[in-house]
Image: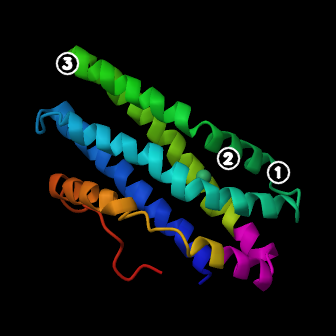
C-alpha cells in the first residue's frame, strides 16, 4: 500500500461518509422522522467546503501535475477534475445559499434545498469515482518509487480528515454518528487498508 494513495482514499471515505449522512438526514426530514437541525446542516456543508479545499485537493493537484508530466492519456479527465477543484468554493456556496433559503422559507423551501444537495452529491460521487478508477491506477503504474517517496513525505505532514484542526471535525462526525445510526454512522472503516 502506498501511503499517499491510502491518505487520499481515507479522505474520500470521510467525504463519502458525510455525504451519506446528509442523504440520510434529508430523507429523515422529508419523511417527517427528523426535524431540520440547521446548525448541524451548516456544519456539514462547512465541512465539505473546507476539508477538501484545505486538505484534499492540494494533495490531488500535486499528483495530477506530476501525472501530466508523464502521460497525455488522462488529460481529458484531469482537465475536468482540476476545473471541479477550482469550482469547489462556488459549488459549496450554492449549497450554503440553498440552506439559507430553506432556513428563511421553512418547509415549503425544503424541496429546492434537497434538490441542490442531491445535485451536489451526484457530482461529487462522479468526481471521487473518476479519481479512484481512472487516475490513481495510472499514477500507481507510472510513478517511480522516488516520486512516491517525495509525495508520501509531503502528505504525511497533513492532518487526518476525521479530526481536523483543533479536533473540530471529530465533534462534527460524533454528532453525525449519533444522528445517523449504522450503516450510515461513520468513522474510519475497521480493517480498511
Ligand atoms: Fe478531487
Ligand atoms: Fe478526491
Ranked by sequence position, the earlier of labels 3 and 2 is 2
Whether residue 138 appears in magenta in the rendering, the answer is yes
Within 10 Å of the Cα at label 2, are there few (<14), some (14-19), or many (20+) other Cα atoms? many
Tell me what residue is drawn at x 74 percent, y 49 percent.
77
Instruction: Please say whether residue 184 is visible from this viewpoint.
Output: no
The image shows residue 160 at horizontal and vertical percentages of 44, 68
Q: Which residue is mark 3?
A: 106
Task: Name the one closer to the observer, 109 or 94.
Answer: 94
Q: CA distance from mark 1 to mark 3?
A: 44 Å
Tell me what residue is drawn at x 46 percent, y 30 percent.
93
Cβ of mark 2 under 8 A from ligand 1: yes
Q: Image quadrant of residue 80? A: top right
Q: Secondary structure at mark 3?
A: loop
Task: Name the one closer to the observer, 126 or 58.
Answer: 58
Q: Is residue 35 left or right of residue 111?
A: left
Q: CA distance from mark 3 to mark 2?
A: 35 Å
Task: Name the one closer to the observer, 178 or 158.
Answer: 158
Q: Which mark is residue 90?
A: none
Q: Which residue is mark 1?
A: 75
Q: Secondary structure at mark 2?
A: helix
Within 10 Å of the Cα at label 3, are there few (<14), some (14-19), or many (20+) other Cα atoms? few
Amino acid at each position: 500500500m502506498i501511503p499517499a494513495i491510502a491518505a487520499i482514499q481515507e479522505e474520500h471515505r470521510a467525504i463519502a461518509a458525510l455525504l451519506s449522512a446528509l442523504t440520510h438526514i434529508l430523507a429523515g426530514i422529508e419523511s417527517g422522522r427528523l426535524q431540520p437541525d440547521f446548525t448541524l446542516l451548516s456544519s456539514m456543508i462547512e465541512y465539505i467546503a473546507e476539508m477538501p479545499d484545505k486538505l484534499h485537493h492540494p494533495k490531488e493537484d500535486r499528483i495530477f501535475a506530476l501525472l501530466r508530466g508523464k502521460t497525455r492519456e488522462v488529460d481529458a479527465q484531469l482537465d475536468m477534475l482540476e476545473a471541479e477543484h477550482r469550482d469547489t468554493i462556488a459549488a459549496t456556496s450554492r449549497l450554503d445559499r440553498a440552506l439559507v433559503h430553506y432556513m428563511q422559507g421553512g418547509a415549503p423551501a425544503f424541496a429546492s434545498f434537497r434538490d441542490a444537495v442531491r445535485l451536489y452529491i451526484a457530482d461529487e460521487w462522479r468526481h471521487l469515482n473518476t479519481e479512484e478508477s481512472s487516475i490513481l491506477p495510472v499514477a500507481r503504474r507510472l510513478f517511480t518509487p522516488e516520486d512516491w517517496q517525495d509525495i508520501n513525505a509531503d502528505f504525511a505532514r497533513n492532518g487526518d480528515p476525521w479530526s481536523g484542526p483543533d479536533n473540530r471535525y471529530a465533534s462534527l462526525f460524533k454528532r453525525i454518528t449519533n444522528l445517523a445510526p449504522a450503516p450510515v454512522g461513520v468513522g474510519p472503516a475497521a480493517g480498511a487498508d
